[in-house]
Structures are given as structure tokens and as C-alpha cells.
Image: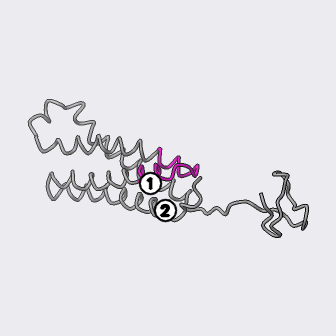
Amino acid sequence: MNCPNCGEQIKDENALFCSYCANRLNFAKKRSGFQITAGVLTIIGACISISVGLIGIVPFVFLFRTFLAYGSMSYILVMGVFCVFAFAFGLMSSIFTLRRTHFKLSIIGASLVLASGFVIITSFGELGSSALVSGLVFGIPVVVLSLLGLIFAAISRTEFV
């Protein structure tokens, strides 16, 4: 390791001061709050996603025979399953973002949460215009939160190990 002030090689890696110029050695990386913000936003978006996903799965579990007659309700089941998987990957993504590791996996997980927001909107939209309002109410917050999380993670890409 070399001294950032005089350029001389420092033999002791635990040294706090340069033995040649006596200046303080400061190799600490500059960290911003963007990654913490990105991780928290992704967690919130993933939690909204799984809550809507469970709303889609629970009726099929308890009322399976009733829903066999309704073919259009299968969109809600697909949405529920996708939202549960998006939650798992979104949680993993936010943990990696908060720990500042695995940038690509962080982006992939947050992107799946973003996609789950769009799946929520389109699944409820297939049921009619009155259900589309519910899809927008639950889907837009997921899209906005995960998109902001992606942007903040991308801004702080240099802080990842």
C-alpha cells in the first residue's frame, strides 16, 4: 500500500500515519445513505407485494372448487404466486444492498419486485375496470418504491464490494 500524500510504500498495513511524511493515512471509503434507502424501499415494496400476493392465493386455497368455474380468476392466482416469489427475491436483494455486496443480484431482486407491481396492475385489470382501480391502488406503490430502490442502488454502485 502506498501513502496517498507522498506516494512512498508503507510496509505496515495497520499503520495510521506515514513513516516518511508523517501524514495521517485515511483509506476509508466514502459511503452515502443511498444504499440504506434503496434497501429499505425495496423491503417495503416487497412487503406490499406479498400482502397482495397472499390476497390472491388465499381464496384459491380455501375456495378451490368455487374458483374452478371462473376461468378469469386464474390471473389472480398467477399474480399471487409471482408476488410471493418476488417477495423472496426482493428481501434477498435488500439484504445484499444493505450489506453492500452482490450488485447484480441486488438489481435482479429489485427488478422482480418492480415486475410484481406491473403483474398486480395487469392481473386486476383483466377482471374489469372496477378491479383495475384496486390493481392501481396496490400496484403503483410497489412500482414506485421498487423503482426508487433500483435508482438509489444504481447511483451507489461504486460502494458495492
Q: Secondary structure at mark 1?
A: helix
Q: Is residue 82 left or right of residue 18?
A: left
Residue 71 spot, x, y in % from top left: 10, 41
Q: What amino acid is found at the position of numbered circle 1 in the picture?
A: Ile
Q: Mark 2 sits on what residue?
A: 154
- Whole-Å distance between the Cαs marked 1 and 2? 8 Å
Disc 1 target residue: 107
Depth order, front residue of 92/45: 92
x 85%, y 52%: residue:
12
Is there a contact, CB below 8 Å, between mark 1 and mark 2? yes
Residue plotted at (27% across, 59% down): 136
Number of marks: 2
Type of the residue with mark 2: Ala
Q: Earlier in the sequence, mark 1 or mark 2?
A: 1
- In the rendered view, would you say 151 is above or below 90? below
Q: Residue 57, how many percent across, how many down?
A: 27, 38
Percent across and percent down for residue 149 are 46, 59
